[in-house]
Amino acid sequence: MYAQKANAPTRKPVTVPSLRAMKAEGRRIVMLTVYDASFAAQLEMAGVDVALVGDSLGMVVQGHASTLPVTLDHMVYHTSIVARGLGSTLLVADLPFMADRDVGHALEAGAQLVGEGGAAMVKIEGAAPHILDAISALVARAIPVCAHLGLTPQSVHKFGGFRIQGRAQEAADHLVAQAEAVEAAGAELLVLEGIPTGLGERITRAVSIPTIGIGAGPHCDGQVLVLHDMLGVTPGKRPKFSKDFLAGRDSVAAAIAAYAEDVRNGAFPAAEHSFD
Ligand code: KIV
């Protein structure tokens, strides 16, 4: 409890431009969600490239059944406490449900997450016309954007549950078009969630920005998991796309380091964590 802050940079800082360089060089990007300063320090020490304060905190921290009850105040608070534990890891924060309902609200939310929270980039779900406008507006104000397509959890009611997206040809083509649209709008990074492996590969080839998969197969430019899932502490059944990296290891640090290594060397995700 009285140990020194662990946020001295452990390596060259990861930046938005360096993510593109990683894609160009074929170096896989390691991303992990995190919600507080102590775990942020663990990510930093393990050399995780990107820390995501996801609105998944509504489920794994607050105990809700979805991400929908998370507010902008919650996101700014958790982003700011995570920022204190990081040094060189790039910090991305989610725009919560309805914070992107129009361009004005998206800009206000982006300003708070970056200005008060300390994020270097904000993540926004979907590719509806108002989302594309919001991406362009944020980017024009020097707020880098990570897009998020596929099984976007804020659309859980529209999807009728947390269901894999893009299985049918038409739906897959639509997702490719959406990926091209978010890139054209100015997004610098693209999370692909809950889509078949082949579609993850197709989108990764179709765009020049890095793709980060979660249940999107091994061909994405990087991977992200929810911290509580990969530490095996999420109650209930572990999602198919995740893996308990703490099982058989004796510390959180070892689990996060193993995850980072497995993403970088291509061992994770395996076929058993992917959808055909
Ligand atoms: O909220 C979150 O944690 C996310 C990841 C699952 C990508 O959006």
Image (cartoon, rainbow, N blue to C red):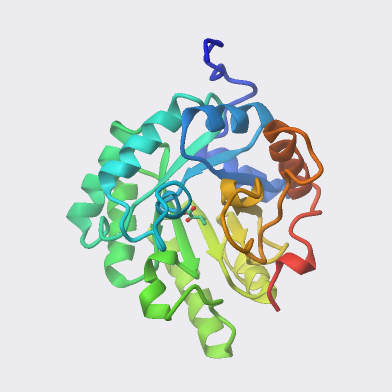
Residue nearest the viewer, comparing 74 with 30: 74
Q: Is residue 193 above or below residue 112?
A: below
Which percent across, then down, holds residue 222? 65, 52
Residue pictured at 52% horizontal, 36% vertical: 90
Q: State the residue lying farthest toward the left.
A: 104
165 or 172, nearer to the observer = 165
Closer to the camera in the image, 148 or 69: 69
In the picture, measured across the screen, residue 250 lies left or right of residue 66, that is right
Q: Residue visible at 41% across and 72% down? A: 156
Q: Is residue 153 visible?
A: yes
Asked where in the image residue 218 lies, by quadrant, the reply is bottom right
In this view, 9 is above or below 195: above
Residue 180, position as x, y percentages in the image: 48, 69
Q: Is residue 168 left or right of residue 160?
A: right
Q: Position of residue 53 (x, y in %)?
A: 45, 43
The residue at 66%/55% (across/down) is 221
Identify which residue, 73 or 112, lies in the foreground: 73
Residue at the limit of the structure toward the front, as seen here: 236
x and y percentages locating residue 56 in the rendered image: 45, 53
In the picture, measured across the screen, residue 117 lies left or right of residue 84, that is left
Q: Is residue 141 visible?
A: no
- Quadrant where the C terminus is found in the figure: bottom right
Residue at x 42% of width, y 37% of height = 120
